[in-house]
């Protein structure tokens, strides 16, 4: 890495300070403009993060641009342009002269930026220090004197810091750390896919086709911000347990909006003597199944189910079925239906 001048080092320190801020991503993005202006005297700025599921990149910051440019760049056409210019595969800031295609073929420039009076610009791929592509930073000027090569190169050096400031996984990692004994985790997306969470391994229970993800998605669909339940455990990370505890922590509604929640795997805790069949029955009670439906699903007599529920009440020190169900729900002492497969 080339040696930074004193002024450049000051900018890097300021960007790092903003990155350490715990306020929302949109606030950090806006605050980044001041140190970036000391690198390049821009007239307009764009910062966006990618929503890959909808192929959108709505801006965190859009300053000095008209609504036409905003609408174009925020949607699928803007994402396609980023791909056309290979920015999503690059780590280097690019001036207009660095782009791999003629400017007249770059729609954002030919139809929006040049007609608006801009004459210079630089676009910076935002890639985290561990290599994940997040989105883009674009700065435009009204003169061909800027950006300079030195400014372009400094923006390349600063880009991992800028990306770190805007990385949504940081808040998700912080949420996962709330579950202090978590041994594995994944991030659940809007479409029900599982995305790796940096810093924690994944787990077979968190695979995309797992009933655990289905159960978590159903909880989130009700508007719940937190859920805890059990799943039969067959992995090696918790060899002393027959069950693993799954904790679901919904992510605050902030960009990028396709990242919905973090799921963690941890030891099951005290099961109060409940058996696997007890936990399945509690899962049905949580879903408000009546005795006859439970009996039919388990191929048991209704009287046998009633006796079993009474024993569950005793184990949970609950005076009645409703209180046993409430305690099981609050303490996560049940196996949800998508995991037990007792859906009928």
Image: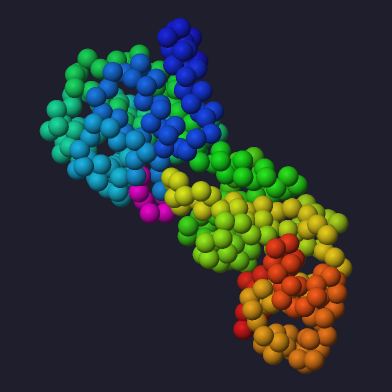
Q: Is residue 314 above or below residue 66?
A: below
Residue 330 position (above or below residue 41): below
The magenta region covers 52-57
Image side of residue 27 versus residue 189, left or right: left
The mark total stands at 0
Q: Main secondary structure of the magenta part?
A: loop
Q: Quadrant of the C terminus?
A: bottom right
Residue at (60%, 53%) from the top-left corner?
A: 249
Residues 240 and 106: in front is 240
Rendered location of residue 272, percent (x, y):
85, 65
Tell me, yes or no, if residue 1 can be seen here. yes
Residue found farthest to the front: 319
The reply to whether residue 90 is in sight is: no
Q: Nearer the viewer, residue 132 or 306?
A: 306
Image vertical order of residue 104 relative to residue 50, above or below: above
* Residue 55 is inside the magenta segment: yes
Please check the rendered image and state whether residue 116 is part of the magenta-colored stretch, yes or no: no
Residue visible at 30% across and 45% down in the picture: 74
101 or 256: nearer the viewer: 256
| Residue 289 in picture, x, y percent from top left | 65, 82
Q: Name the one closer to the observer, 148 or 337.
A: 337
């Amino acid at each position: 890495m080339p040696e930074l001048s004193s002024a450049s080092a000051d900018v890097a320190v300021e960007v790092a300070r903003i990155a350490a801020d715990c306020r929302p991503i949109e606030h950090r993005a806006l605050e980044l403009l001041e140190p970036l202006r000391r690198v390049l005297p821009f007239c307009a700025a764009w910062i966006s993060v990618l929503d890959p599921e909808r192929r959108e990149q709505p801006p965190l910051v859009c300053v000095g641009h008209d609504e036409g440019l905003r609408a174009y760049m925020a949607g699928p056409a803007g994402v396609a342009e980023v791909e056309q210019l290979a920015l999503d595969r690059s780590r280097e800031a690019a001036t207009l002269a660095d782009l791999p295609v003629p400017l007249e073929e770059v729609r954002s420039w030919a139809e929006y930026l040049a007609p608006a009076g801009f004459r210079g610009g630089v676009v910076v791929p935002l890639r985290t220090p561990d290599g994940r592509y997040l989105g883009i930073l674009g700065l435009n000027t009204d003169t061909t004197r800027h950006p300079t090569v030195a400014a372009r190169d400094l923006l390349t050096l600063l880009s991992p810091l800028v990306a770190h400031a805007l990385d949504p996984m940081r808040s998700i990692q912080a949420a996962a750390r709330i579950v202090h004994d978590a041994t594995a985790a994944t991030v659940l997306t809007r479409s029900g896919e599982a995305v790796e969470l940096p810093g924690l391994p994944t787990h077979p229970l968190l695979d995309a086709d797992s009933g655990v993800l289905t159960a978590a998605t159903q909880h989130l669909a009700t508007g719940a911000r937190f859920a805890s339940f059990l799943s039969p455990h067959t992995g090696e990370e918790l060899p002393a347990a027959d069950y693993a505890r799954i904790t679901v922590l919904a992510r605050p509604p902030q960009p990028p909006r396709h990242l919905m929640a973090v799921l963690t795997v941890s030891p099951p805790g005290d099961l109060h003597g409940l058996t696997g069949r007890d936990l399945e029955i509690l899962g049905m009670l949580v879903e408000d199944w009546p005795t006859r439906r439970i009996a039919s699903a388990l191929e048991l007599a209704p009287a046998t189910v009633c006796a079993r529920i009474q024993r569950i009440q005793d184990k949970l020190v609950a005076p009645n079925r409703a209180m046993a169900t409430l305690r099981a729900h609050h303490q996560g002492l049940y196996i949800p239906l998508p995991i037990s497969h007792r859906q009928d």
